[in-house]
Image (cartoon, rainbow, N blue to C red):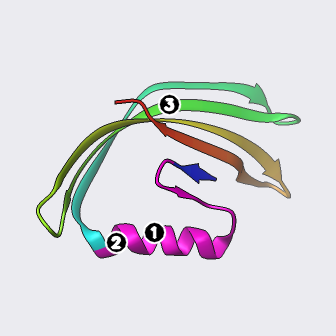
Amino acid sequence: MYYPDFPVKSYDDFLRWYKGVTDNITWNAHDIQNLSISGNQDEGWQVSYDVVWKATAKNGDKYDMRVHQQLRVVLQQGQLKIAKLHAEVIE
């Protein structure tokens, strides 16, 4: 997984990234736009969308950004799993 501010290469990386979010953000909202999904059960799915993220930090900073995300989702042992995620700030 790759987020613009923090590459996530392990479960522990994800926990550190998410702790940073929960420790510093007091309010946030997500609006999903431009959703596109292609693929199939055998080969997996390519998912593309934009997230309009608005947030307020504990220090009073305000965030209002658009992040484009691309995912590869696969079916493994009857469960959907994110095999790859890339996020890039576009505004």
For label 1, the SS is: helix
Q: CA distance from mark 1 to mark 2?
A: 6 Å
Figure disc tally? 3
Q: Which residues are magenta?
A: 4-23
Residue drawn at 53 percent across, 42 percent down: 87
Kind of residue at disc 3: Tyr
Residue drawn at 42 percent across, 75 percent down: 19
The quadrant of the rendering that contains the C terminus is top left
Q: Is residue 18 above or below residue 5?
A: below
Judging depth in this view, the residue of 15 and 7 nearest the camera is 7
Q: Position of residue 84 (x, y in %)?
A: 70, 47
Q: Is residue 55 above or below residue 25?
A: above
The residue singled out by tag 1 in the image is 18
Q: Position of residue 62 (x, y in %)?
A: 16, 51
The answer to whether mark 1 and mark 2 are in CB contact below 8 A is yes
Left-right relation of 57 to 39: left
Asked if the magenta segment contains residue 6, the reply would be yes
Kind of residue at disc 2: Thr
Residue drawn at 27 percent across, 49 percent down: 29
Q: CA distance from mark 1 to mark 3?
A: 21 Å
The residue singled out by tag 3 in the image is 49
The residue singled out by tag 2 in the image is 22
The local crowd at label 2, few if under 14, some if 14 to 19, many if 20 or more residues have their Cα within 10 Å, is: few
Left-right relation of 38 to 14: right
